[in-house]
Image: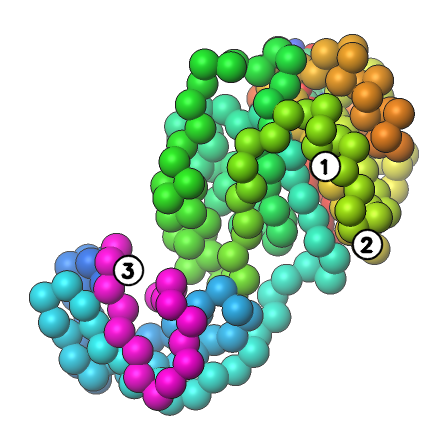
Amino acid sequence: RCYSAKPVTGDTLVIDGPEAHHLLHVLRVQPGQSLVVFDGTGVEFACDVSECRRAEIELVVRSAEPVDRELPYSLELGVALPKGDRTRWIIEKCVELGVTKVTPLVTDYGDRKAKLESATKLQRHVIEASKQCGRNVLLGISRAVQFAEWVQESGEHPCLQLLAHPGGVALHRVKPTSQGPTRLAIGPEGGFSDVEVAQAQAANWQIVDLGPRILRIETAALKLVAAVAE
Ligand code: SAM
């Protein structure tokens, strides 16, 4: 599978940049070989390699077919992202589990000096994970948002809003399987502050407990997302 950053519109297309580099120098594709291309619009394009140049590959499109591997509702995860590899891991698992959007949260006890990976780097994680798991629509990563602002957004009228915090209602008691737009929140290493928990409750979020042990951010995110995404 290969991702085209440009929408596929005609009978031929040219792949360049990091995707072409990977195909040419890691997978060593040759003219005549077949590839599946996706451009993030939910369509899979069956293509044949027609020409390999130094830094780009030309493909001929044989067929186009919509292939839907999305959840039937939107699922957003707001999370105080940890550093480096742990962020990559969260993004990868969110892509695999069908999360629609990840929103990095700025929280009271979060590490304010921690620098979020660049948007380009985060987008590469999304593309790599989508290639691996067969997803044809890219997970969106929004800009970092203040928790207090984000928790009150309800543009899409979410039908389920769960914030993970020790001492909340046991997860299995809230019947987390959702039928409509869903929002989930995971805090930083220092946890959510009492003020943040109160802000969430005032905005109709349910506070859920994920069990007797304190989980790291990425484990908590995976547990909550996996419980909801079916
Ligand atoms: N000392 C922090 C506290 O007590 O909240 C621990 C924070 S934990 C490393 C990071 C985030 O994961 C938390 O803010 C929460 O959202 C989630 N989390 C981890 N373990 C949890 C649990 N057992 N129940 C609910 N949420 C949990």
Binning the other alpha carbons within 10 Å of mark 3 as few (below 14), some (14 to 19) or many (20 upward) gives: some
- In this orientation, which residue lies closer to the viewer: 185 or 198? 198
Q: Quadrant of the C terminus?
A: bottom right
Residue 40 falls within the magenta-colored stretch: no
Residue underneath mark 3: 19
Distance between the alpha carbons at the discs numbered 1 and 3:
32 Å
Distance between the alpha carbons at the discs numbered 2 and 1:
13 Å
Task: Give left or right: position of 197 versus 120.
Answer: right
Residue 104: assigned label? none
Which residue type carries mark 3?
Glu
Residue 8 falls within the magenta-colored stretch: yes
What colouring does the structure picture have? rainbow
Tell me if residue 211 can be seen. Answer: no
Task: Give left or right: position of 112 versus 188.
Answer: left
| Ligand 1's quadrant | top right
Circle 1 SS class: strand
Q: Is residue 3 above or below residue 167?
A: below
Circle 2 SS class: loop
In the rendered image, residue 226, in percent from the top left (x then y), is placed at 67, 43
Tell me if residue 179 can be seen. Answer: yes
Q: Report the span colored magenta.
A: 1-18
Distance between the alpha carbons at the discs numbered 2 and 3:
35 Å
The residue lying at 64 percent from left, 25 percent from top is: 146
Residue underneath mark 1: 184
Q: Earlier in the sequence, mark 2 or mark 3?
A: 3
The residue lying at 15 percent from left, 59 percent from top is: 25
Residue underneath mark 2: 180
Q: Earlier in the sequence, mark 1 or mark 3?
A: 3
Which residue type carries mark 1?
Leu
